[in-house]
Amino acid sequence: MRALTVEPKKQGSATVEEVPEPPVEDGPVLVETLAVGVCGTDLEILSGQYGWAPPGRDRLVLGHESIGRVQEAPAGSGLAPGDLVVGIVRRPDPVPCPNCAVGEWDFCRNGKYTERGIKEHDGYCSERYRITPEYAVKVDPSLGSLGVLLEPTSVVAKAWEQAERIGGRARFEPKVAVVTGAGPIGLLAALLGVQRGLEVHVFDQVTSGPKPELVAALGAHYHTGPIEEAVKEPDVVVECTGVGSLVFDAMEHLGPGGVVVLTGVSSGGRSIDVDAGLLNRAMVLENEAVVGSVNANRRHYEQAAEALAKADRSWLEGLVSRRVPLEDWQAALERQPDDVKVVIEVAK
């Protein structure tokens, strides 16, 4: 079967090649891959910055944002041939750490977890893969290939859960939310905020193209300036860029008792001026909180599946800028001005 593989930490090593059929030890459920999404993590792996091959191997099958169709499933698994499914990315560490031992493997504490398409476990950008039922999440059939958006939606589902859990330390009735960044993660975070009945404000740099239109279509508000010029003391901020100045801008202008959830990963190496004393004083006196959030557990995938099932299909379709066939995978890396989410179609 064909697969997109790469030699991690080696730039320019990616290629579509013939690989063996998926190993039985990966699970009894056989899935035909329909499509995989391309995100920043994939680009880092392809550029040689990141990634780990499975033990004893030099190459890794890429792809962690997936949508596929079940071909084989054992009786009693809750799955049947024809079901649309998304494969969960992370697997618990074998030790296990205290969190992995109780099924909270997205909070693994020793770093020995594996991740499909990223860390020591082949991903989903192959014509077929195998998986155990507990790591396959069913998707509403009406979503079709738009189910490829489920994995990034799971990331923001977890972010919203974190905000609500932390806010719930006291009476928490959020009304206004800010999302920084209008990429796929930011737009999906805005979707989940609107579905919660919040007044949502999205901040990004571009002034035209699909992003402002997608935000407006949600009934949310799009801005290009500083937070304080548009929103007074939001209750929740979901930060989706990793840009240091935006992170501190969000923290500085948070409302009393509010929560900032950081989902973007900063590159580091840049310095910014911050009045740390003033920031500390405001956060302490106003009971504010900042939390980092990464990856997702099965319940977040299920929450994401529910959110996508309720979403307007035409709006979701607007997130997918381009679809390229597997053999033309390099075209998916060539960033175009109006790109939001680019998808590689694996099934012919």
Image (cartoon, grey):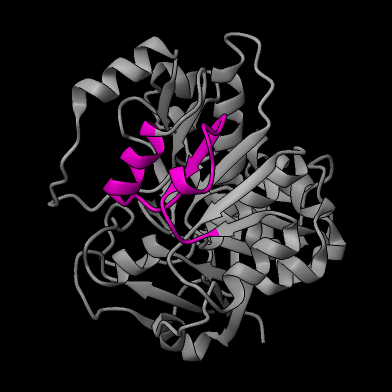
Looking at the image, residue 210 sits to the left or right of residue 80; the answer is: left
Looking at the image, residue 127 sits to the left or right of residue 49; the answer is: right
- Residue at (15% x, 41% y) in the render: 273
186, 345: nearer the viewer: 186
200, 269: nearer the viewer: 200
Residue 63 vs 158, above or below: the answer is: below
Q: Residue furthest right?
A: 142
Q: Is residue 297 visible?
A: no
Q: Quadrant of residue 218?
A: bottom right
From the top left corner, tell me how far across and down residue 64 is, in percent.
50, 59
Residue 241 magenta: yes
Q: Quadrant of residue 130?
A: bottom right
Which range of residues does the magenta coloring cover?
Answer: 223-252
- Residue at (19% x, 30% y) in the render: 275
Residue 257 magenta: no
169, 78: nearer the viewer: 169
- Residue at (30% x, 27% y) in the render: 110
From the top left corner, tell me how far across and down residue 283 is, in percent.
36, 18
Q: Quadrant of the N terminus?
A: bottom right
Residue 121 vs 13, above or below: the answer is: above
Looking at the image, residue 68 sits to the left or right of residue 286; the answer is: right
Q: Quadrant of the C terminus?
A: bottom right
Q: Is residue 47 visible?
A: yes
- Residue at (87% x, 64% y) in the render: 142
From the top left corner, tell me how far across and down residue 324 is, in percent.
56, 86
Residue 215 vs 347, above or below: the answer is: above
* Label tally: 0
From the top left corner, tell me how far across and down residue 232 is, in percent.
53, 36
